[in-house]
Image: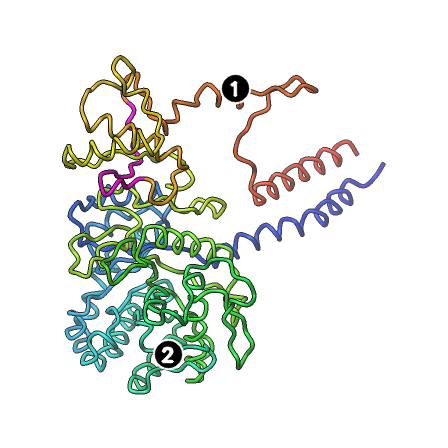
Amino acid sequence: MENPKLVILFCLLVLLPSSLSTVIKVKQGKDEPYVGVNIGTDVSNVLSPAELVSFLQLQKITHVRLYDADDKILKALAKTKIRVIITVPNNQLLAIGSSNVTAVTWIGRNVVAYFPETLITAVAVGDEVLTTIPSSAPLLMPAIESLYSALVAANLHTQVKISTPSSFSIVLDSFPPSQAFFNKTLSPVVSQLLQFLSRTQSPLMMNLYPYYVFMQNKGVVPLDNSLFKPLTPSKEMVDSNTLLHYTNVLDAMIDSVYFSMKNLNVTDVVVLVTETGWPSKGDSKEPYATIDNSNTYNSNLIKHILDRSGTPLHPEFTSSVYIYELFNEDFRSPPISEAHWGLFYGNSTPVYLLHVSGSGTFLANDTTNQTYCIATEGTDTKTLQSALDWACGPGRANCAEIQAGENCYQPNNMYNHASYAFDSYYQKEKKAPGSCDFKGAATITTIDPSHGNCIFPGSKKVSNKKRQVVNSTRSSSAGTVRFLGTPMSSFDKDLHMIFLGVVFCWFYSFLS
């Protein structure tokens, strides 16, 4: 008879590497890059804090940045596991930079009061201070140091980082990236900032917009490079000094920041992209601010970050990014594009359907596949009639259900009939960008507009019977039901195998 202890020892030796691998995966997961969103509040139909948090959870958004430290939002975020960056507004820099007591009070009121129930990960001190209000630049480092000292006193300095978001305009001669450097007039402040970030292991926050680089260099920077579109080798941007190949503008911008830091002998500070995005609408001077380009940029951005491919200079590290922004801020001043950077309208309906399937569960409006196109409330009857005629005519929407006597004829009004026709066209076009517009007469919604016996084309109810058949398919060989559920993750499989192995070892040693 074999020694049971030897059997158990052998099993542990076999299983231990697998279990360690699983633990390492979990640990590495904490450092994986993420995509967050900025939340502005210049919105007419602003959601309540509770509604906002529910919406973030629905969309699987786990990281947000606020432009203040709104107490109601911070309370609503408690116990949600959503991580948040809060901001010291520019108009508070003078008071905080001039008084340690004010800094302690600010941290106590806006961080200590909510942490750890609300997962505050960082404090952004001002926003683009060095370029928008250069007269306040001398106050920046005193404010940062005072706030950090307050965090140290509260013993939160290792959990909550401090930095300040800067505009890309602080970097000069940015392409090729290897020749980039920080604006020398700002060097004294930037050098102090980088030394602080290095000492406290905090990121350099940068607002990086390939849209503006493209607009300022039309004819030099191709649109495809700005939108992360696939390129042939001949269209890649090449740094003549390093021979590094750049397939997109954002990577080139990030690397130019790294080279600029290297010129100041700083190599251990990572870049956190606190703002990036592309507007979906603009005036005649901004013809590239379109729904299609905005959709393409943000969709490809999400894929690029979650692919964890890094940059040509630092392929081993991928910067996390915050998309600017969650909602269209319709109260923003001109130009028109200022009010059209959002992924969603203020009422939480998507501006467009992001193409991010296959990139995890971030932004569920792409993976639920439950969006509908309906008439915009308040649109005049003449405009709706014209759009309805086009949808049912040249647009080839299926309008049979809104004919007299059919299921969707009632209520017999222009809004109802136009909504059905718009959704029919939208679904027929596979929800392509721009297919739910009709010159502003239509809008996308995540709420199923079906009612009574009237089932809209995009409704789940249309294919329920088919779905039930598929989900109960029987295996002809085994005669058992085959369920089409969510597959196990690799982590679940590892734990499953470890568990089975332990059970086997115990049972075998028992028999021995």
User: Would residue 229 be found to the left or right of residue 106 on screen?
Assistant: right
Label 2, on which residue?
194
**Does 176 lie within the magenta span?**
no
Residue sitting nearer the eye, 68 or 314:
314
Tell me which residue sits at (17%, 70%) in the image: 102
Furthest-front residue in view?
394
Q: Percent from the top left, x then y, of residue 329?
A: 21, 53
Q: Percent from the top left, x then y, of residue 111?
A: 26, 60
Tell me the element at label 1: helix
**Does 443 lie within the magenta span?**
yes
> Which range of residues does the magenta coloring cover?
436-450
Tell me which residue sits at (29%, 59%) in the image: 287
Amino acid type assigned to the residue bearing label 2 in the image:
Leu
Q: Percent from the top left, x then y, of residue 79?
A: 32, 46
Give the vertical position of 312 relative to 191 (above or below): above
Residue sitting nearer the eye, 363 or 442:
442
Amino acid type assigned to the residue bearing label 1 in the image:
Val
Prevailing SS of the magenta stretch:
loop
Q: What number is the disc on residue 469?
A: 1
Q: How is the image coloured?
A: rainbow
